[in-house]
Image (tube, rainbow, N blue to C red):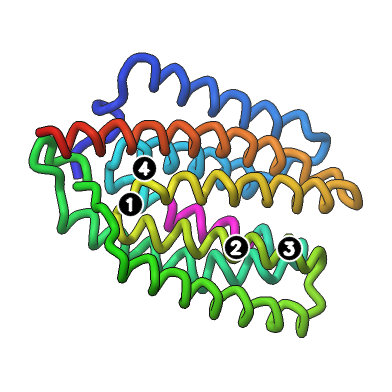
Amino acid sequence: MSNPIKALSKNERIFWIVSLIIVALSNFFSGDFNVLTLAAALIGVTAVLFGAKGNVWGQILISVFAILYGIISWQYRYWGEMITYLGMSLPMALWSIYTWIKNPSSENKAEVKISRLKAKHYVLLAISGVIVTVGFYFLLKFFDTPNLIFSTLSIMTSFFAAALTMLRSSYFALWYAMNDVILIVLWVMAAISNPIYIPVIANFAVFLLHDLYGFYSWKKREKQQVNS
């Protein structure tokens, strides 16, 4: 639970500050400023970067982001996103806080120990992923959710990302990156009918860069932990 900012390198701090500026400007000059969207974006960007460092503060901030993003999704009637983040991502992020705190790296107590999944994990992930995806598809269809296919894909990628985060696997960031791409498509569709959501597109574009960096960072630390 140490100060996560101290763990950032000079380049990472520059990356973080530039990302915050881009997100802030995209919100301020959107023509319809939304405080909630800005707050969610700033917290989300910071959470992803802290998560890339394997710091538990990343999961704490992700929990806050999940609540804010769930509210934003409710405003546009993206029931899939709202249900996913409040009903799935939030509880799994809270559980990840516990698993990360309980499994610190032996090299650096401020970082989580990376886990390599076994065959049984992949089987359970595949089975549960199919159940979650199919179940939510019919639930979202019942609620007449806009852009049903992309909303369902978002749930699938969010589930695998959150589950792999909880299991402390390096591949959680890669699934979050895929989720970012899908969310960019979803909010482009939303922005076509309401320009207020244009900043959300910029937000997830920045998230995509951070999640790709997170995957690189975790794989690098994974090699270091194996060789130590």
Residue contact at pointers 4 and 1, CB within 8 angstroms: no
For the point 37% across and 55% down, the residue is: 165
Residue contact at pointers 1 and 2, CB within 8 angstroms: no
What is the x, y in percent for residue 193?
Answer: 91, 52
Query: Which residue carries the number 1 mark?
Result: 169
Seen in the picture, residue 12 relative to 24 is either above or below; the reply is above
Main SS class of the magenta portion in the image: helix
Query: SS of the residue at dot 4?
Result: helix
Query: Which residue carries the number 2 mark?
Result: 70
Nearer the observer: mark 1 or 2; the answer is 1
Nearer the observer: mark 4 or 3; the answer is 4
Q: Which of marks 1 and 2 is nearer the N terminus?
A: 2
Nearer to us in this view, 46 or 88: 88
What is the x, y in percent for residue 11?
Answer: 39, 15
Q: In which quarter of the image is the N terminus?
A: top left
Query: Which residue carries the number 3 mark?
Result: 75
Q: Which of marks 1 and 3 is nearer the N terminus?
A: 3
What is the x, y in percent for residue 168?
Answer: 29, 54
Query: SS of the residue at dot 2?
Result: helix
- Tell me the amino acid under the disc marked 2: Gly
Q: Distance between the residues labelled 4 and 3?
A: 28 Å
Seen in the picture, residue 146 relative to 13 is either above or below; the reply is below
Category of crowding for the residue at label 1, using alpha-carbon neighbours closer than 10 angstroms: few (below 14), some (14–19), many (at least 20): many
Residue contact at pointers 2 and 3, CB within 8 angstroms: no
Query: Which residue carries the number 4 mark?
Result: 51
Q: Earlier in the sequence, mark 2 or mark 3?
A: 2
Q: Earlier in the sequence, mark 4 or mark 2?
A: 4
Nearer the observer: mark 4 or 1; the answer is 1
Stretch of the chain drawn in magenta: 62-71
